[in-house]
Image (spheres, rainbow, N blue to C red):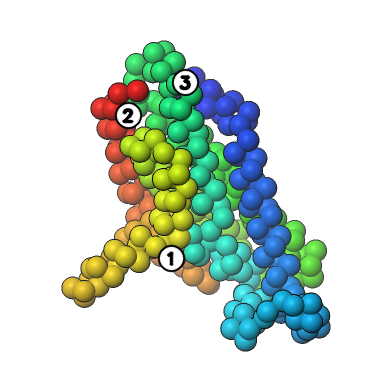
Amino acid sequence: MFNLLRMELRRMLRSKSPYVAVLWVAGLLLMEVVTIRTVSDPELAAEAARKGMEITVEDQDEFEEIMEGSALQSLYTGTYANGGAVIIALYIVITLMICSDYDSGFIKNIFSLHNRRGGYVVSWMLAMQILSLILNLLAIGCWLFYSRTAGMGFGSDSLQDYLLFLLLFQVIGGGFCAQAMAFALITRSKAFGAAASLVMCGGIAAAVVEMIFGMKQISVIKWTLYGASQAMSFPVQQGRVLEASGIALVWMIFWIVVSMIVVQKRDV
């Protein structure tokens, strides 16, 4: 398995998709900071309006609310609370890598050298956890750098808050990666994976499930991966974060098991 992990990491380094994911996250965060800075400053907002930018009262209220929070709270509200750039990037990267293995026929070489196909699933999960940590740290670092450069005075957060934040989104990212892997192994379709990244990570599927169960007065959204991503609140509540992390961990294990079953049963 460790040989597989080294191979997957080398392949990721040679692939374009992880680097595109890094640029995607850094670029979206930059655009978000520029937008918030513009809308929250009356002079900049007026100048932007003169140049054709449409700014509603709702936009101003939303961005002013973001400005009133801490740095971590503003990052969460603007980037992570509704699916977010990092989770979508991870979802698409794992989908592309798995589907490419099958499209190129490289998967035959892997399974001919490694009889235990489950190691393929585990090695990719470990590789994606490394990429997830890089993207999460990048998001935090870029947000702090961009906001400070733009003169946006967010409140400070404790080290524990950052550690709990990383814990939660490492597990949630792992859960969505495991789900994306299962879908990729079942469908072997990049298009399906790209669509699923928006439907699943963006909460559309969770909302549909919540609506169905809501007819019987049952709320299930907190038990979904998307629901777990909404569990972050400020000031940070450790118990709530740990509960959401546990829910996400269960889903990650579930989808890993599904992936292992599929990879063992389906022909290459």
**Which residue is painted at 28% across and 27% down in the image?**
266
Instruction: Give the residue type that dot 3 points to.
Output: Phe
- Spatial distance from mark 3 to mark 2, Cα to Cα? 14 Å
Amino acid type, residue under disc 1 in the picture: Ala
Tell which tag, 3 or 2, sits nearer the viewer: 3
Q: Which label belongs to residue 263?
A: 2
**Going by the image, does 13 lie left or right of 44?**
left
Quick check: 202 left or right of 142? left
Residue 104 vertical placement versus 141 (above, below)? above
Residue 229 percent across, percent down from the top left:
44, 60
List the residue tagged with mark 1: 231
User: Residue 59's x, y, as percent?
Assistant: 62, 80
Mark 3: secondary structure: helix
Tell me which residue sits at (51%, 51%) in the image.
88
Residue sitting farthest toward the left? 216
SS of the residue under disc 2: helix
Compare marks 2 and 1 and give the one earlier in the sequence.
1
User: Which residue is outermost to the top?
Assistant: 113
Amino acid, disc 2: Val
Numbered mark located on residue 152 in the image = none
Local SS, label 1: loop
The image quadrant of residue 157 is: bottom right
Using the image as rendered, state which of residue 224 and residue 231 is in the foreground: 224
Of the numbered discs in the image, which one, if any, rests on residue 106?
A: 3
Residue 33 placement (x, y as % from top left): 70, 66
